Image: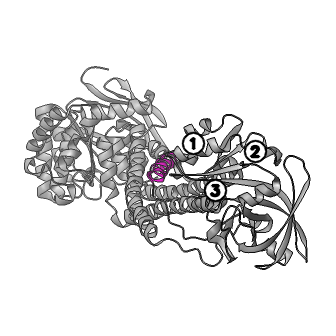
């Protein structure tokens, strides 16, 4: 695996046995390089979230393997995997999912506490991130007092706190209006360019697809299209691309 | 620290549920504190009833007397002993007694009894026999010729105040029988069936005269200035008065059945406490599982961020312990208030009182307030909570992040 290669999946499979057998991911081979701004698209049930869970170590594959920065995550123990996620992966969720009993500052610094970073350095980093997402004045505000857009900005700051190499965002704009979504995506794209962090989105949002530099289309657990730059064809609201109609 | 912060703040997230759980914990804990106070109040009551009725806090006998009960096994050098007791600061009162098995006969019946010769003035300071006179009067002096008998004995012998009764004893030195005619001057009712059935009191000089004894006694009962002295094994008194042929014993050695009964009761209290702890701990378990179920996704987020399985477990344990601490503080205050309230008004013993191990408690019970149950039960409860919280903690530690994020427990 070369230095530029961040995520490599080989014949990745995930099958659920919930009464009936569901093959959520079927033999995906994929390489994602450092610094990519990639969106995974596809209709509901196509396996996007399962794929994100597998490449982040949140779930274990039924077959195949995932290499993250050269390390096979399937061989890690529970604690090793936790530490790996803590240090290398940032998550942004659809419903923001900030911890409601913690303030914006505390939500952002949580992962740094897990890393054992001292309070002074943590607070400096938190202020830096809050500045970056434009919420320096909301440092001591609890999530319930923030708007949806503000919560997602805090979530972005939280995902970046540990300086991870990858940020995985599962439908990050699903609960936001188009203006707020646009602003948030601009911000993340800027962060991607400035810091070199890899962003991988799972999305139905055309705004995300438009801004993504690479578009992976998943259908029935398989990657059916892998497009970059001007080649990209944005699916419609039914999840189908023009050439599929 | 962040885990404690999370645990503590989460308590106040669902205030209604926390309030109900806290109420259950605090009421359970307060009940334990109060129950403990009542038990020790009753124990003190029984202890006083037992020691003040006749036993005393301690007794001194000639070595061998308690096993032989022979009239000739007397205390060595009674005058020196009583002089020494007079000088003791910890001794509030003492009373020499003369004992003998006797046969008492009335025109209607005959019964074996224990004849006890007492010095009424000294005895009044030590025991409350004079207060238990149900009819007639108490012994008026050391050489009073009157006989004071128990109410049950009077019934058996069909004796009333002023009736004649013949008492037969065996003399100390010769073993010859000695008889005397007495008039029943008083009838006592101590609440102790044995005493009421088989004890007859006479003036100490009168009894000595019948037994042909010089200035001596079989027993000196002692009352200390504090209840605690009778409970202390290391008190100097026991060594000092267990010399020269005498033996000093505390009430605990004199009435071991009472001590065993107390011990048994303490074991029962501990068992009841344990059941209470487990019940209350299950309230916590239920609360934590409800919380765990509601916050599955949140736990998924924490796991995704890199919280280790053990750290997840720690959050749950801390949350359980935080809930327990809140409940304990509220329960301690409630227990304190209720105990203080009944300490002032007392719990009335209606009717003929309650008999326990041959001791009838007739006076009101005043719960005892001491730090021990607060500390003991708090530690017990926290340990119980900790142990029971390991189950949801284990559950949380085993959560799969992907399943938690899809809100599946």
Q: Could you tell which of marks 2 and 3 lies nearer the N-terminus?
A: 2
Which of B314 and A3 lies nearest the eye of the viewer?
A: B314
Q: Does B304 sit above or below residue B157?
A: above
Look at 35% across and 54% down and name the residue there: A44
Q: Residue A106, position in %: x, y?
A: 21, 45
Residue denoted by label 1: B84
Residue denoted by label 3: B265
Residue denoted by label 2: B74
- Disc 2 and disc 3 on one polypeptide chain: yes
Query: Is residue A52 on the magenta stretch?
Result: no
Quarter of the image where one finds residue A2: top left
Quick check: B64 left or right of A138? Answer: right
Q: Could you tell which of marks 3 and 1 lies nearer the N-terminus?
A: 1
**Chain letter behind tag 1:** B
Magenta range: B370-389
C-alpha separation, residue under disc 1 versus residue under disc 2: 17 Å
User: What crowding class fits label 1: few (fewer than 14 Cα within 10 Å), some (14-19), or many (20 or more)?
Assistant: few
Element on which disc 2 rests = loop
- Disc 1 and disc 2 on one polypeptide chain: yes
Q: Residue B137, position in %: x, y?
A: 67, 74
Q: Is residue A19 visible?
A: yes
**Chain letter behind tag 2:** B
Q: Does B164 sit above or below residue A232?
A: below
Quick check: A31 left or right of B55? Answer: left
Element on which disc 3 rests = helix
Marker disc for residue B47: none
What secondary structure prevails in the magenta region?
A: helix
Element on which disc 1 rests = helix
Q: Residue B384, position in %: x, y?
A: 51, 49
């Amino acid at each position: 695996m070369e230095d530029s290669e961040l995520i490599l999946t080989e014949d990745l499979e995930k099958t659920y046995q919930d009464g009936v057998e569901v093959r959520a991911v079927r033999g995906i081979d994929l390489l994602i390089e450092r610094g990519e701004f990639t969106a995974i698209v596809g209709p509901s049930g196509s396996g996007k979230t399962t794929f994100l869970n597998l490449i982040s170590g949140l779930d274990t594959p039924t077959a195949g393997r995932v290499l993250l920065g050269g390390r096979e995550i399937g061989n890690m123990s529970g604690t090793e995997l936790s530490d790996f996620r803590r240090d290398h992966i940032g998550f942004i969720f659809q419903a923001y999912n900030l911890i409601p009993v913690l303030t914006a500052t505390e939500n952002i610094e949580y992962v740094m506490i897990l890393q054992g970073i001292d309070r002074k350095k943590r607070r400096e980093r938190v202020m830096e991130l809050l500045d970056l997402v434009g919420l320096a004045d909301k440092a001591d505000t609890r999530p319930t007092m923030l708007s949806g857009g503000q919560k997602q900005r805090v979530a972005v700051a939280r995902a970046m706190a540990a300086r991870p190499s990858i940020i995985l965002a599962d439908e990050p704009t699903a609960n936001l209006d188009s203006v707020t979504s646009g602003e948030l995506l601009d911000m993340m794209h800027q962060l991607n360019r400035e810091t070199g962090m890899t962003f991988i989105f799972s999305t139905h949002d055309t705004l995300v697809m438009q801004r993504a530099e690479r578009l992976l289309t998943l259908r029935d657990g398989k990657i059916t299209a892998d497009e970059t730059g001007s080649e990209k064809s944005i699916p419609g609201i039914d999840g189908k691309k023009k050439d599929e109609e | 620290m962040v885990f404690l912060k999370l645990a503590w703040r989460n308590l106040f997230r669902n205030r209604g549920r926390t309030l109900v759980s806290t109420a259950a914990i605090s009421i359970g804990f307060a009940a334990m504190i109060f129950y403990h106070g009542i038990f020790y109040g009753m124990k003190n009551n029984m202890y006083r009833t037992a020691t003040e009725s006749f036993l005393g806090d301690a007794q001194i006998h000639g070595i061998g007397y308690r096993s032989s009960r022979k009239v000739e096994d007397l205390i060595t050098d009674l005058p020196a002993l009583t002089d020494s007791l007079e000088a003791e600061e910890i001794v509030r009162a003492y009373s020499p007694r003369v004992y003998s098995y006797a046969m008492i006969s009335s025109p209607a019946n005959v019964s074996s009894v224990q004849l006890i010769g007492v010095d009424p003035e000294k005895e009044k300071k030590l025991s409350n026999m004079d207060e238990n006179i149900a009819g007639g009067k108490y012994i008026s002096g050391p050489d009073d010729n009157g006989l004071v008998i128990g109410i049950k004995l009077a019934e058996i012998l069909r004796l009333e105040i002023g009736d004649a009764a013949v008492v037969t004893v065996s003399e100390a030195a010769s073993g010859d029988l000695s008889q005397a005619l007495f008039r029943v001057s008083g009838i006592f009712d101590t609440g102790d069936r044995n005493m009421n059935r088989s004890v007859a009191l006479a003036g100490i000089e009168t009894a000595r005269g019948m037994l042909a004894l010089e200035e001596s006694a079989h027993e000196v009962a002692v009352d200390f200035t504090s209840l605690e002295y009778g409970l202390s094994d290391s008190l100097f008194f026991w060594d000092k008065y267990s010399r020269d042929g005498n033996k000093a014993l505390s009430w605990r050695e004199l009435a071991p059945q009472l001590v065993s009964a107390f011990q048994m009761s303490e074991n029962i209290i501990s068992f009841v406490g344990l059941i209470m702890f487990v019940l209350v701990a299950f309230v916590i378990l239920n609360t934590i599982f409800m919380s765990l179920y509601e916050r599955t996704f949140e736990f998924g987020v924490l796991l995704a961020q890199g919280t280790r399985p053990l750290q997840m477990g720690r959050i749950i344990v801390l949350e359980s312990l935080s809930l327990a601490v809140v409940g304990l503080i509220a329960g301690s205050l409630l227990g304190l208030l209720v105990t203080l309230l009944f300490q002032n008004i007392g719990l009335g013993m209606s009717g003929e009182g309650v008999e326990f191990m041959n001791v009838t408690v007739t006076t009101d019970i005043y719960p005892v307030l001491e730090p021990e149950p607060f500390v003991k039960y708090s530690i017990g409860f926290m340990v119980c909570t900790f142990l029971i919280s390991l189950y949801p903690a284990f559950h949380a530690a085993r959560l799969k992040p992907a399943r938690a994020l899809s809100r599946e427990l």
